[in-house]
Amino acid sequence: MEKRMLGELEVSALGLGCMGMSPVYGATDDEESIRVINHALDVGVTFLDTADVYGAGHNERLVGRAIATRRDEVVLATKFAITGLTEDYAPIVDSSPEYVRRAIDASLDRLGVEVIDLYYLHRRNPAVPIEDTIGALAELVEAGKIRHIGLSEVNSDTLRRAHAVHPVSALQSEYSLFERGLEDEIFGVCRELGVGVVPYSPVGRGVLTGKLPDVNALSADDARHRLPRTSGENLRHNAALLAGVFGIAERLGATPVQVALAWLLAKGGNVVPIPGTKRIPYLDKNVGATRLRLTDEQVAEISEAVAADQVAGERYTPNGLAAVRQ
């Protein structure tokens, strides 16, 4: 598989988001998830993404089990700072230097590794100066516990201030045909600073698959019930926006998901989407997106097929939105 650079960190052009392998989007199967992770490594998807908050540590332990005999093949990313979630799915955040130092040791232990390749600040508490948090992360680089520093869902000013303290390799933010706020300003700042862009939820939390026409089809414990964009009438409205993408996919001999991922990959050589899946056939289809080369005209056509201003519902609850772009 093609390699791309996140700052000075080389990764596969497509990563694997492992969050859904913990109880977030319905039922999970650890043994099947371990098979998926190993299959990903077999086909060249070597960039794995997890976080300490996913499944309250379950996800890191799961990934650790999966890569125990294959650590040298993996570029391993995890995150810290979200200590819990409120009832309306808003994060409770601790980005203090003291918490950084506790969180890293806990993650290393759960993952069963000696060093983490990319360690993200998952969310930022604005009461803590970003310089203090990055300073603590720089100490972890010096100590050999992490190799590279990443940020998630910060604004351009925070990114610049952080980068001035220590190079930031990657910014992970939601980015898809349904969510393009990153393009307004932050995307350009990433290019200017040499920071990689890691889109999470690159297929709109599954909506771009075309297989989520009704929220009632989701299990009762699925987190998408709590997100405005994937709830009730908003979900039905947004699914209907995909007709143009389906037409383009059919013409290209691809799936809508492959088109959505290829559209992101075409945005720049510093863009590395991390679609999540719990099934090998879906993983293989995702990998197919890396072989779909879009022309500039096709990228523009896909952009126009889903008008950003027509997407219904916010991606998070009001309190959840307050925690992004900090």
Image (tube, helix red, strand yellow):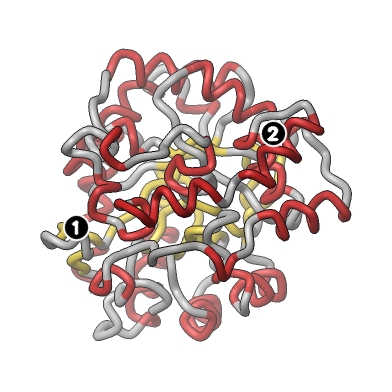
Left or right placement of residue 266 versus residue 7 in this view: right
Instruction: State how many labels appear.
Output: 2
Give coordinates of residue 304: x percent, y percent.
72, 60
Q: Name the residue located 20 percent from the left edge and 46 percent from the top edge.
A: 106
Q: In the orientation shown, which residue stands out farthest toward the left? A: 87
Q: Amino acid at mark 1?
A: Arg
Q: Which residue is mark 1?
A: 102
Circle 1 crowding by C-alpha within 10 Å: few under 14, some 14–19, many from 20? few
Left or right placement of residue 161 versus residue 2 in this view: left
Q: Name the residue located 17 percent from the left edge and 37 percent from the top edge.
A: 220
Foreground mark, 2 or 1?
2
Circle 2 crowding by C-alpha within 10 Å: few under 14, some 14–19, many from 20? many
Give coordinates of residue 28: x percent, y percent.
26, 24
Picture quarter containing residue 20?
Answer: top left
The residue tagged with tag 2: helix, strand or loop? helix
Vertical side of 182 occupied by 117: above or below: above
- In the image, which disc is placed on residue 289? 2
